[in-house]
Amino acid sequence: MVASLPEILRGEGLPRYEAITPEAVNAHIPELMTELEAELEVLEQGLHQQLSSGGGPLGWSAVMDPLQRLGERLRWSWGVVSHLNGVCNSPELREAHAAQQATVVAFGNRAGQSQVIYRALERLQQQAEAGGAHGLDGAQRRILAAELRDMQLRGVGLSGAEQEAFNAASQELAELSTRFGNQVLDATNGWTLRLSDPAEVEGLPASLLDQLAQAARGAGEEAASGAAGPWLLGLDMPRYAPFMKYSRRRDLRERLYKAHVSRASGQDDGSPDDSSPDDNGAAERNNWPLIERILTLRGEQAHRLGYANWAEVSLAAKMADSEAAVEGLLEELRAAAHPVAQAELQALRDCARRHGAPEADDLKPWDVTFWAEVLRQESFELDSEALRPYFPLPRVLEGLFALCNRLFGIRIEAADGEAPVWHPDVRFFRILEAHGAADGQPLAAFYLDPYSRPGSKRGGAWMDECLVRSRRPDGTPVLPVAYLICNQSPPVGDTPSLMTFEEVETLFHEFGHGLQHMLTTVERPQAAGINGVEWDAVELPSQFMENWCYDRATLLGMARHWQSGEPLPEQEFTKLHAARTFMGGAATLRQVHFALVDLKLHSQWHPGCGQTPEQLRRSIAATTTVLAPIDEDAFLCSFGHIFAGGYAAGYYSYKWAEVLSADAFGAFEEVGLENEEQIRDTGRRFRDTVLSLGGSLDPKQVFEAFRGRQPSSEALIRHSGLVAV
């Protein structure tokens, strides 16, 4: 009888998450790495013989297919460990992840620096250029070019001491990145503030009071209620953002804001000793040294690879062809947004003055969202909180799925119970073809993990790959499966998750990423879905989907009161639409600030430049903010996108891709959003190009195939409310 394979090594199908334990990670990941190392050696030996014997031409199946299979086994097993580390974090899993990470990174370096494989890829490329029977299709050529480039960026051209130093730095960077993210998670979870006096919660809506009371019950205050308290405040977004927006207690807003912007910076966070008994490690959770070390190591890596700085390394694999091109777009947006943001700030001061607020002449960052909400309600008679009952998660999902049917001809069905999950809140859905001869044909599936879990789930929202579209050796298809992760307000008691409009936009955004992953028709996994798509084009589908939150048919079709079933009143939609560009200058300027700081840290900062990363950030803030950062502002210490994620010297990608996504949505505006037949036709064209072609074509060609021309920034500036400037 053959012993069954440990779940973590199965390498195919949907994982059984309960079997991926810290013990399994420590027991079986070393076993997997030993096997992969041995298989890599066998592949290299075979290729070496073929290259040195001057034998016949190399085939794709002799090089790329076995290389992809090796990578996929590692991606499946280590991917599920990394996934669980983000959504079910625990000290034990964290330790197991850290213990095995070095071996995983070492294998990546080893494969990426294989001279034999590199020579084989070069031979494959030369054969393709010569044409004939050994020619490759367009997707194969792009995959091959990307693999050669990535091997160059992984140090295949280095040898001896330089290669050893490169590999040591790669290991250290992986470890620092994980530590950075863990310290942000710990700092976010480590700060709480117990409120017991009704005066401390003045102005807060009932939904937030219920949520704060639920947090208090979770912390052991069994009698806590929304009406009577006590209430437990925290730094996770579902509690932080609405408190900053509605609290009339300026002193508490200040305290909360300072705790939030100083996370993981080693500062005393101002949390009283009795409110955060587990928060003794604020001083130890200091990401400043990690930031300098990460930036230093990246700079050294760039020099080893022959680049001037890490920004050049990053741009080598992007759609933008130079730092100047990126700075040109950011300056265009900055110049348009800055005067608008100044006018917006003045409008907030005037509003505060009308209300007799003593801070009117000296607004601080913790006043901005509060007075912006007051002004929004006055200007548009639009109460963000009053909208929430119209956006219960089940109804929003129905609306989102109906939109996908309308635009892309797909049907989405709940399939809860048909797949293992990692938490009871997680849902599972299947996507089916919904038109033509293939009606009912399965296309893909996805998990949705919607709610915030501050103790064990990292903040933010993201899409990740569970399974990638491909074909098995026997020719049967592997259908794509996505992880869709959000951190929205959880249900409270019998009340479903009532979403803020921003949370609705976030769900649509992540679903856009998911659609590109799931609706791909490319069957070579290296270019299927988001794979092989330049990073600064990958936000196109996600930001495109956000636009539909403001589409009349979409919004009024899904916004229904969770108790009465009444649709959102027409006038509320009109107000929501009118308020779309409210504070648009500040929003654009904020993104430009983050993008420029990221770019300059990776192109200008080095240990001998005479200033700290924070000093460089503050010099950039002079022209990219209208309220200077306060002394306690240590935003860089929680800037996980660039220090614990994949956006280093790439944060500009959000704005770069937003040019594409706004222009793409412009195609629907041009045919008329009420013109159903044209909308469906345009939606199918979007599916057949942007969502289908993945990384098989240059993104400029993909965009042109959809739009019929190259992109223009006109639509973005119009959508952002900056057109008057």
Image (cartoon, grey):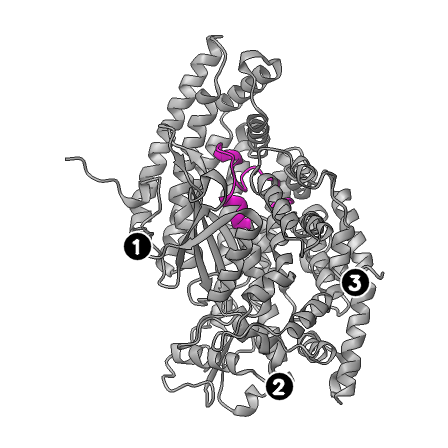
Q: Could you tell me the amino acid type at mark 1?
A: Glu
Left or right: residue 717 compared with residue 545? right
Q: Earlier in the sequence, mark 3 or mark 1?
A: 1
Q: Position of residue 569 (x, y in %)?
A: 61, 74
Q: Which region shows up in magenta?
A: 513-538
Q: Amino acid at mark 2?
A: Arg
User: Which residue of the protein is positioned furthest toward the right in this rendering?
Assistant: 725
Label 1: element kind: helix
Residue 716 figure quarter: bottom right
- Farthest residue in the left direction? 1
Q: Which residue is mark 2?
A: 249
Q: Is residue 96 magenta?
A: no
Query: Residue 61 at x, y = what percent?
Result: 45, 22
Q: Are marks 3 and 2 in contact (CB under 8 Å)?
A: no
Label 3 packing within 10 angstroms: few (<14), some (14-19), many (20+): few
Residue where numbered disc 3 is placed: 622
Query: Looking at the rendered structure, which numbered label has been put on residue 18?
Result: 1
Residue type marked 3: Ala
Q: Which residue appears at 46% of the width and 8% of the height? A: 53
Instruction: Name the secondary structure under disc 2.
Output: loop
Residue under the point 61% across and 33% down: 697
Q: Nearer the viewer, residue 350 or 528?
A: 528
The residue at the point 47 percent across, 26 percent down is: 64
Q: Residue at x 51, y 68 (%)?
A: 188
352 above or below 281? below
